[in-house]
Amino acid sequence: MTPGPVRDPLHEPLPSMPGPAFEPGAAVKVPRYGAGVVAADDSQTVTVTFPNGSTRCFIASFVKRRVR
């Protein structure tokens, strides 16, 4: 028997990353900071704008959707 192809982990495709968790404009709530609106996000972070005009960036799992 001949051996099969050798697996090279350095040249395998990377797993796909999940897409954004929130849409810009979505109503959210952040513990300690309160209610805000999503300004931007990617697969790991969410930027939230609060009613007082401040903007902060959070780890996506820290931000919860808010029911209006």
Image (cartoon, helix red, strand yellow):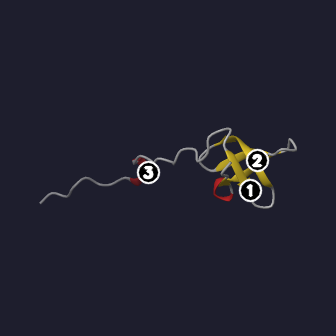
Q: Residues within 10 Å of mark 2 (few under 14, many from 20)?
A: many
Tags 2 and 1 in contact by the CB under 8 Å rule? yes
x then y, percent, for residue 66: 67, 52
x then y, percent, for residue 6: 29, 54
Dot 1 corresponds to which residue? 30
Mark 2 lies on a secondary structure that is strand
Label count reads 3
**Closer mark to the observer between disc 1 and disc 3:** 1
Tags 1 and 3 in contact by the CB under 8 Å rule? no
Lower position in the chain sequence, tag 2 or tag 1:
1
x then y, percent, for residue 46: 68, 47
Dot 2 corresponds to which residue? 36
Tell me which amino acid carries mark 2: Gly
Left or right of 10? Residue 30 is right
Left or right of 6? Residue 34 is right
Tell me which amino acid carries mark 3: Leu
**What is the number of the mark on residue 2?**
none
Mark 1 to mark 3: distance in Å? 39 Å
Which residue appears at 45% of the width and 50% of the height? Answer: 15
Dot 3 corresponds to which residue? 10
Residue at the far front: name it: 68
